Image: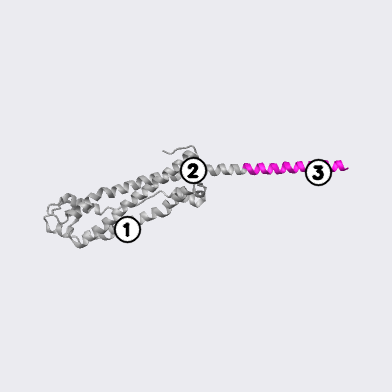
Amino acid sequence: MKKSTQTRITRYTLELFVIIFGISVSFLLNEWRENRQNFKAEGAALHAIYDDLIADSLVISNEAKLLANNQTYYNYFLKKVYSENANPDSIVRAIGAFAMYTTLETKNVAYEQLKATGQLGLITNKILLKEIVEIYTNEYGITRELSSIDKKMVLEQYIPYLLKESPLSLNDLNNNFDLKNPKYLKLIRDKTFLNMFVININFKDQNIQRYKNLNDNIRKVLNGINTEMKERFNYKKS
C-alpha cells in the first residue's frame, strides 16, 4: 500500500513537472515570437522614418538654396540703393526676389502612424529615438513658424504695398526699370519700403540658418539610423 502511494506521488510529480515544463517552453516560445515580431517592426519603423527624412532633407536643402541664391541681390540692393551707378537689373532682381518665400512641407505620415500605434516605442536606441522625436515635434515647428512669418510679411505687407502704394505699375517695375526716373527712386528709397525690406531680409537670413541647422540635425539622425540598420539588422541604408 505504501509503495503504491509512493508510486502515485512520483507519477503525479512527473506529470506536474511535464506540465510546468510545457508551460515554460510555451511561454518562452511566445516571448521569442513576440521579440522577433518587435524586432522586425523596429526595423520597419526605422526604415520608414529614414526614407521620410531623406525626402525632407532634400526639400530643406532646396529651400535653403533658394533663399541663399538671392542673398547676393538683397545685399547688393541695400548697398547700392542710394548709388547713382547701381545696376538696374540687380535692383529689379532684388525686388522680385524679396517677394519669394519658402514653405516647409515635410513627410510626417510614417512618424505619426508609428506614434499613434505605439510602435515608435519599439525603437530600443533611446538616444536616437529622442533625436527623432525632437526633429518632428520641435525643430519642424520652429522652422515652419519662421517660414510663416516670412510668408505673412510678403503676402500681407510687401505685395499689398506694391499694388497700392507704389508709384509704379508692376509692368513698369519689371520691364521698364530706369534708375534715372524719379518714380523708381521714390519707390526703392521710400522709408516704409526700405524698412520692410530690411526686416524681411533679416527673417530670410534666419530661415537660411534654421534650414541649415535642421538639415545638419537630420543628417545626424540619418547616420544614427544607418548605424542601427547596419549593426543590428545587417542592412545598410544608402
> Mark 3 Cα within 10 Å, few/some/many (few <14, many 20+)?
few
Residue that label 3 marks: 9
Residue that label 2 marks: 44
For the residue pair 209 and 170, the one nearer the viewer reads as 209
- Residue at figure coordinates x 45%, y 51% from the top left: 133
Q: Which residues are magenta?
A: 1-29
Look at the numbered disc 1 and give the secondary structure of its residue.
Answer: helix
> Mark 1 Cα within 10 Å, few/some/many (few <14, many 20+)?
some
As measured in the structure, the alpha-carbon distance from the residue carrying label 1 to the one carrying label 2 is 37 Å
Look at the numbered disc 2 and give the secondary structure of its residue.
Answer: helix
Q: Residue furthest left?
A: 180
Query: Looking at numbered disc 3 in the image, what kind of residue is underneath it?
Result: Ile
Q: Nearer the viewer, mark 1 or mark 3?
A: 3
Task: State the predominant SS element of the stretch in magenta.
Answer: helix
Looking at the rendered image, the quarter that the N terminus falls into is: top right
Q: Position of residue 237 (x, y in %)?
A: 43, 39
Q: Position of residue 44 (x, y in %)?
A: 49, 43
> Mark 2 Cα within 10 Å, few/some/many (few <14, many 20+)?
some
Query: Looking at numbered disc 1 in the image, what kind of residue is underneath it?
Result: Ile
- Residue at figure coordinates x 29%, y 47% from the top left: 65
As measured in the structure, the alpha-carbon distance from the residue carrying label 1 to the one carrying label 3 is 82 Å
Query: Looking at numbered disc 2 in the image, what kind of residue is underneath it?
Result: Ala
Looking at the rendered image, the quarter that the C terminus falls into is: top left
Left or right of residue 236, residue 161 in this image: left
* Numbered badge on residue 170: none
Q: Earlier in the sequence, mark 1 or mark 2?
A: 2
Residue that label 1 marks: 149
Residue 211, visible in the rendered structure: yes
Q: Position of residue 33 (x, y in %)?
A: 59, 42
Q: Residue furthest right?
A: 1
